[in-house]
Amino acid sequence: MLYMMYIVGNYKYREYRINSNIEYLEKLKESFTQKIQKAEDIIEYKNTKAYKNKILKQEQGKKNKGEQVVYLITEKKYEKYTKPASETLSQIEIPLSSEENLIQSMSIYEKWNYFLFGKDVR
């Protein structure tokens, strides 16, 4: 009797393991089919004319016949690039750093000491 219970239990356990493996494989198959379908959809989208046109316009700056490109920028940037060069150069001021101010206020002897030994002897 004990042997019969062992055989039935062993059979049920093997049947459970086989069924759980079958369920796992079915779920795995479903996930793979979904991923394959998603990849096919992406490939199909990337092969369309609209997508290729979009990429050419974004990366290479190309445009179709009859299209006009309008760039939206601020008025300040527009004036920066449309003013004559002489006006823009006169507006640019380069501030001196504190070290440059220090060097300009030194005598020649003090400059040599500063550059050679790194000491301010004023």
Image (cartoon, rainbow, N blue to C red):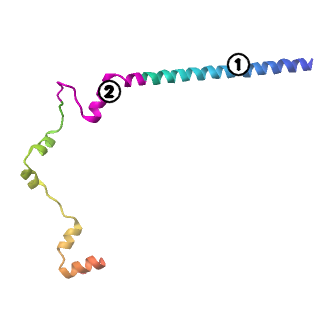
Find disc 1 in the rendering and name its residue.
19
Q: Position of residue 88 (x, y in %)?
A: 10, 51
Query: Which kind of residue does numbered mark 2 sit on?
Result: Lys
Identify the residue at the far right of this view.
1
Mark 2 lies on a secondary structure that is: helix
Q: Amino acid at mark 1?
A: Asn
Q: Which residue is mark 2?
A: 52
Closer to the camera in the image, 103 or 84: 84
Assess whether residue 51 is covered by the magenta stretch: yes
Quadrant hosting residue 89: bottom left
Q: Residue at x 24, y 34 (%)?
A: 61
- Quarter assignment of residue 79: top left
Residue 66 on image: x %, y %: 17, 24
Q: Give 44 or 72, whichever is nearer the viewer.
A: 44
Q: Position of residue 20 (x, y in %)?
A: 69, 21
Where are the magenta residues, as a range? 42-68
For this view, does 40 lie left or right of residue 61? right
**What main secondary structure does the magenta stretch of the protein show?**
helix
Q: Assign a secondary structure to mark 1.
A: helix
Determine crowd level at label 2: few under 14, some 14-19, many 20+ residues with C-alpha closer than 10 A.
Answer: few
Residue drawn 62% across the image and 19% down it: 26
Locate the N terminus by quadrant.
top right
Is 66 situated above or below 59? above
Residue 11 lies, with reference to residue 89, above or below; the image says above
| Residue drawn at 50 percent across, 23 percent down | 36
Q: CA distance from mark 2 to mark 1?
A: 48 Å
The answer, for residue 120, to whether it is visible in the render is no
Report x, y in % for residue 56. Answer: 29, 31
On the picture, is 76 further left or further right than 28? left
- Residue visible at 14% across and 58% down in the picture: 93
